[in-house]
Structure formats: structure tokens, C-alpha cells
């Protein structure tokens, strides 16, 4: 018999978070559903106005349509936050990849970026609904909108770049660098569009903070969305790593 | 990294590697000599700038020329600069690639930071040279009939700050895209969103100088400070990340 060979190092996928992920998915689904019910059944409209008719908020008359359109906020804001958190993780794993050259972190970074793109698209959709009813236009070059458009374009470019590089190692390094550049660029983009006074469009800001009820509802949806994002991340990560494992096994078989 | 090489060569009994400043100046001189002999990149950039001006002229041909043109001119000028420098950035690294120059550089005991700085500075010089020709031309075609504010000459400052940022970020990104399929499109895809904040600040500052008065007072300082901040942060980041990119 031939002397026993050392088994090749195979990509691993299943760690302890995979056991938590299904629970997180269920919890996320339940929490976002509760949040959905809360927004319409429990949380009062802004500053206690009634939905049946018009109310004076700040200096402007606000009608039923506007008060109801405000409800999208409870989904828009958590989704936007989750997309940015996913981007932070993508850049974090990008840095860890550059430091260790471990393909595992590259997969982490890529999957986090995918989750980020998913939530960015959801942010854009909910944001468009908000913009249409609140400000009466489909698009305006408002700081937050602009920043998210730019963020979406960079993340899309990230995936196109990944597809355009043939060597896996080089692809991972470039992707990691772009994810770090994206994380640095996005806050600067927000600052610059926010701080430079625009002579054409006034910065649209409505005064008035959140009441406690609104805060609770927002927190419920936020935790729910985070749990959903985490569960999706683990599921996709497992899938990507298993795919890599299959490839590695194929290579190992061909060598023997 | 250069230090290790220096030490290694010193052990072998050969003279130590030249200082980073010397490496930088040699690399920069190499780029400039190469360009001024062929003039390939500068000529194509200037011709391209003229073509962009013609397209902008068509785009504006049905608008009534008036003083209000000044509000648009600052933005259009930056359209011209972004597209022209994109072309130049694409060329700047493909040449290194074609002649196998990059491999030679990486084999030599040269500091990666020096490679980045030399490439960025040579790109900056080319962009500025093209601007020296293209901006007066732009002015001649679009703004000569409107009287700008007295502060118009100050638009040199955002042009300079913007070109520095474009050259710095563009050098990092063009090093990435030179190894990809469809590299021209890829550079534009990465470059335009990443450079967007700088562009926004520079357009704001340029428009401020052209309009003068209230707009100038309100936006000039803040735009310039933000553009300069972008330059500092992004060039530092590009410098740090360049080592990974160029050796990948």
C-alpha cells in the first residue's frame, strides 16, 4: 500500500453561528412582522395628529396621505442601517484578508457585500416611496439619497470587478481594496453633500425628534432586520464555502 | 519593505539601495521622458478634450446664451476634466503593462510607496498640462460672452485641488483595472463613484468663483476645505493600499 497521504486542507463552512442562524431568521421574521403591525396599529402619527383629516405640524399642513407615508420610515431607516453595517463588515473582512491572505475572509467580505447590496436596494425602494410622497418628487439630489446612490454604484462596481479578474488571489486582493475604499468614500460623500450649501435645493430637514413609542417600534424593526441580515449572511456564506469545498475536493481527486 | 532589500544587498557586499527620494525622482523622470518622447498620451488627451467640448457645445446649442450660463459652466468644465483624465489614467498603466516595465520595477529594490507617488505625480503633471490647454479653450467656447465675477481667477485653486485628488485616487484604481478584462469600462465604473464627493466639492467651489458675491461667501471656503480633506484622506488610503494592489 502507498503511504498514507496527508489529507488536503479543505475550506470549512460550519461553525457555531450556523446553529444560531435559523433561530435568528425566525426571530427576525417574527420581529419585523411585529414591527409591521406596531407601525400601523400602535404607533401614533407624528406628534399625536389623527389620521382622519389634516393636522398642523411645524408650520405646514399635513394631510392623511403624508401621515401614512411616514410609516415607511420604520422600515427604511433600519434597512439603511443594516446595509451600512454590512458594508463595515465587508471592509473589516477585507482588511483581515489583506493581513492574513486567508481565503475564508475573502468569502466573508464578498458575502457581506452581497448582503449590503441587497439591503441597499431595499433602502432605495423604500426611500423612493418616501421621497415621492413626502417631498413630491421621484428624485432629488438630497445628501442621503445621493450618498446611497453612490454607495449602490460602488457596490455594483465591486461585483463587476470581481467578475472581471481571472486569477482568484488577485481578485480577492482587489476586492478587499475596493471594499476598504468604499467604506472610506461613503462617509466623505455624505459629509460633502451635506455640508456644502446648495443654492438650488434647500436641505430638506424636518424638525422634531421621535417619541418613545416611535423609538420602540423602530428598535423592534431594527433588531429584526439585523437578525434577518445575519441569517442571510450565514446561509449564503455556508453556500459559498461549500462550493469552494467541492472545488477543492475535485482538485484533490484529480491529483490522486 | 525597501529597508529589507537595502539590508539584503548590503549583506551581499553591494552598495545599499538608493534613498526613497532618489527612487521617486528616477521613476518620475522615466515617466516624463517616456511621455515627452512619444507624446502619445498628451496628444490623445487634448484631442479628446476638444471632442468633449464639441459634444457639450451640441448639448447647449439650443439654450439661449446668457449670464445664467455661468451657473452651468463650472459643472461642464468638470465634466470635461473627469472624462479627459479618465482617458489619461487608462493609458498611464497599460504602457507599463505592455512593456513588462511593472515586473521590472517590482523586481528592483524599489519602495512601493515611491512607485505610487511617482506615478501619481506624473499623472498629475499630465492632467495639469492638458488643463492648461483645455480650460482656456473651454472658456473661449462657452463663457466668453458672459462676464464672470472678479473672483473667477480663483478657480485655479479648485482645479489644482481636484486634479491632485483625481491623480491620487485614479492611480490606485487604474493599477487595479489594468489587470482586468474590459479595463477601460472598469476604471470608469470604479472611478466615477469614488471620486464623486471630490467632484461635487470642486464644482461647488468653481461655480462659486464664477458667480462671486453671496454664493462665493457661502460656499467657497467650505467646498475647498472639504475637497482638500478628501484629497488628504483618499491619497493616504491609496498610498497604504497601493502595496497590496501593485504586488497582487
Image (cartoon, rainbow, N blue to C red):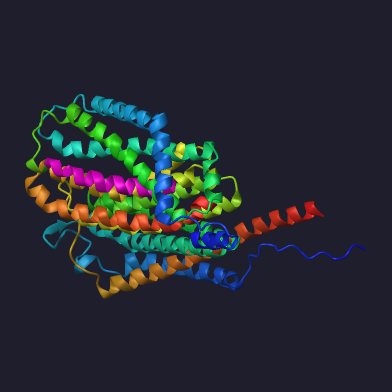
- Front residue of B14 and A174: B14
Counting from the top left corner in percent of width and height, residue A65 is at 24, 54
Please give the count of numbered marks on the rendered protein. Answer: 0
Magenta span has A180? Answer: no
The stretch of residues the image draws in magenta is: B152-173
Give how far across and how far down residue B8 sits, in percent. Answer: 57, 61
Q: In the rendering, at what x and y percent does residue B204 appear?
A: 20, 47
In the rendered image, which quarter is residue B83 located in? top left
Q: Residue at x 9, y 44 (%)?
A: B212
Residue B164 colored in magenta in the image: yes
Q: Is residue A238 visible?
A: yes
The image shows residue B79, relative to residue A9, as above or below, that is above
Residue B106 in the image: x percent, y percent?
53, 50
- Relative depth, front residue between B57 and A18: B57
Compare residues A9 and B110 and report the one nearer the observer: B110
The residue shown at (39%, 54%) is: B21
B35 sits to left or right of B105: left
Left or right for B132, reference B22:
left
Q: Main secondary structure of the magenta part?
A: helix
Q: Is residue B173 left or right of residue A255?
A: left
Along the line of sight, the residue nearer the viewer: B211 or A50: B211
Amino acid at each position: 500500500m502507498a503511504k498514507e497521504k496527508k489529507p488536503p486542507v479543505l475550506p470549512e463552512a460550519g461553525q457555531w453561528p450556523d446553529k444560531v442562524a435559523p433561530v435568528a431568521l425566525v426571530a427576525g421574521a417574527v420581529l419585523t412582522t411585529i414591527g409591521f403591525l406596531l407601525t400601523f396599529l400602535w404607533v401614533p402619527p407624528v406628534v399625536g395628529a389623527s389620521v382622519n383629516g389634516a393636522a398642523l405640524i411645524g408650520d405646514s399642513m399635513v394631510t392623511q396621505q403624508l401621515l401614512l407615508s411616514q410609516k415607511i420610515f420604520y422600515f427604511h431607516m433600519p434597512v439603511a442601517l443594516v446595509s451600512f453595517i454590512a458594508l463595515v463588515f465587508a471592509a473589516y473582512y477585507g482588511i483581515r484578508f489583506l493581513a492574513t491572505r486567508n481565503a475564508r475572509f475573502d468569502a466573508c467580505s464578498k458575502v457581506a457585500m452581497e448582503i449590503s447590496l441587497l439591503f441597499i436596494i431595499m433602502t432605495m425602494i423604500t426611500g423612493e416611496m418616501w421621497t415621492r410622497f413626502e417631498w413630491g418628487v421621484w428624485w432629488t439630489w438630497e445628501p442621503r439619497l445621493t450618498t446611497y446612490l453612490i454607495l449602490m454604484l460602488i457596490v455594483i462596481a465591486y461585483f463587476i470587478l470581481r467578475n472581471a479578474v481571472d486569477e482568484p488571489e488577485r481578485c480577492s486582493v482587489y476586492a478587499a481594496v475596493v471594499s476598504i475604499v468604499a467604506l472610506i468614500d461613503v462617509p466623505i460623500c455624505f459629509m460633502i453633500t451635506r455640508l456644502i450649501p446648495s443654492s438650488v435645493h434647500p436641505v430638506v430637514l424636518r424638525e422634531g425628534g421621535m417619541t418613545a413609542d416611535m423609538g420602540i417600534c423602530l428598535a423592534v424593526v431594527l433588531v429584526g432586520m439585523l437578525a434577518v441580515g445575519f441569517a442571510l449572511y450565514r446561509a449564503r456564506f455556508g453556500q459559498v464555502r461549500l462550493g469552494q469545498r467541492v472545488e477543492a475536493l475535485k482538485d484533490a481527486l484529480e491529483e490522486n | 519593505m525597501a529597508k529589507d532589500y537595502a539590508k539584503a544587498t548590503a549583506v551581499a557586499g553591494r552598495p545599499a539601495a538608493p534613498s526613497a527620494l532618489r527612487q521617486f525622482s528616477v521613476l518620475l523622470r522615466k515617466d516624463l521622458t517616456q511621455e515627452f518622447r512619444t507624446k502619445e498620451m498628451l496628444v490623445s488627451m487634448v484631442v479628446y478634450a476638444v471632442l468633449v467640448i464639441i459634444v457639450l457645445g451640441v448639448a447647449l446649442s439650443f439654450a439661449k446664451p446668457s449670464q445664467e450660463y455661468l451657473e452651468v459652466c463650472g459643472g461642464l468644465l468638470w465634466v470635461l476634466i473627469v472624462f479627459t483624465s479618465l482617458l489619461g489614467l487608462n493609458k498611464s498603466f497599460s504602457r507599463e503593462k505592455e512593456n513588462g516595465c511593472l515586473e521590472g520595477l517590482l523586481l528592483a529594490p524599489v519602495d512601493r510607496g515611491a512607485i505610487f507617488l511617482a506615478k501619481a505625480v506624473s499623472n498629475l503633471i499630465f492632467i495639469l498640462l492638458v488643463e492648461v490647454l483645455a480650460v482656456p479653450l473651454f472658456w473661449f467656447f462657452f463663457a466668453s460672452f458672459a462676464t464672470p465675477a472678479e473672483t473667477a481667477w480663483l478657480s485655479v485653486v479648485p482645479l489644482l485641488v481636484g486634479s491632485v485628488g483625481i491623480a491620487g485616487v485614479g492611480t490606485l484604481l487604474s493599477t487595479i483595472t489594468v489587470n482586468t478584462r474590459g479595463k477601460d469600462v472598469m476604471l470608469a465604473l470604479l472611478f466615477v463613484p469614488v471620486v464623486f464627493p471630490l467632484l461635487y466639492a470642486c464644482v461647488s467651489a468653481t461655480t462659486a468663483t464664477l458667480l462671486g458675491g453671496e454664493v462665493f461667501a457661502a460656499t467657497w471656503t467650505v467646498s475647498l476645505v472639504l475637497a482638500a480633506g478628501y484629497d488628504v484622506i483618499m491619497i493616504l488610503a491609496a498610498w497604504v493600499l497601493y502595496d497590496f494592489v501593485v504586488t497582487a
